[in-house]
Every structure is written in C-alpha cells, then in structure tokens.
Amino acid sequence: MRLRTWKSILFSIAAAATVGVATARAADCGDSADGFNEWLTSFKQVAIRNGLSQQVVDSSLNGVVFDSSVA
C-alpha cells in the first residue's frame, strides 16, 4: 500500500480510539486559535497514550490549524 493510504488508515484508527477515550467535544476546542491549539495538543497526547507513535501523530496532525469560518 502507498504511504499516504497507510497514514490515512492510521489516522482513522487514532481518531476512533481517541473519540472513545477522550472527553474532548467540539465545544471544548474553544472559539479561538489559542483554544484550538490547546485542544490539539491534548488530542495529540491522548493519541500517543493510546499507542500511536509520535511520528504518526506528527505526520497526521502537524499543519492542522484553527479555521474561524468553521467555528
């Protein structure tokens, strides 16, 4: 399989595992870039605690930014 496909699969697994374990809800992301960045840091830590490698977390989530048009 291509690397991109594996990244997508691993990210999906991480997201599913995190949703079942983390208490973060959309409202907890905050309504600003600072609130989102705090949530994202926490989300990454939970993903790592749930068994994902730092490399997978970084390659999947680095570059993710707050989008005020979605909030």
Image (spheres, rainbow, N blue to C red):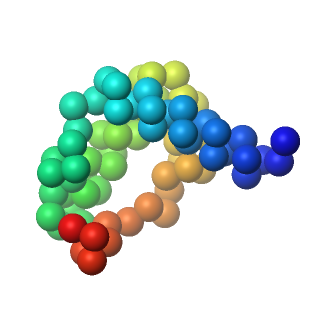
Instruction: Inspect this view and state whether residue 23 appears.
Output: yes
**Residue at image point 44% right, 61% down:** 64
Say if 35 sits above or below 19 in the image. below
Say if 5 sits above or below 35 in the image. above
Instruction: Inspect this view and state whether residue 54 appears.
Output: no
**Residue at image point 15% right, 57% down:** 30
Say if 46 sits above or below 11 in the image. above
Say whether residue 27 is left or right of residue 13.
left
Please state which of residues 55 and 67 is positioned toward the viewer in this rendering. Answer: 67
Please state which of residues 51 and 25 is positioned toward the viewer in this rendering. Answer: 25
Percent of width and height locating residue 35? 18, 57
Percent of width and height locating residue 17? 44, 27
Percent of width and height locating residue 51? 52, 22
**Residue at image point 45% right, 22% down:** 50
Count of marks overlaid on the render: 0
Residue 69 figure quarter = bottom left
**Residue at image point 34% right, 25% down:** 20
Say whether residue 8 is left or right of residue 66.
right
Please state which of residues 33 and 31 is positioned toward the viewer in this rendering. Answer: 31
**Image quarter hosting the C terminus:** bottom left
Query: Farthest residue toward the right?
Result: 1
**Image quarter hosting the N terminus:** top right
Residue 33 figure quarter = bottom left
Percent of width and height locating residue 63? 49, 63
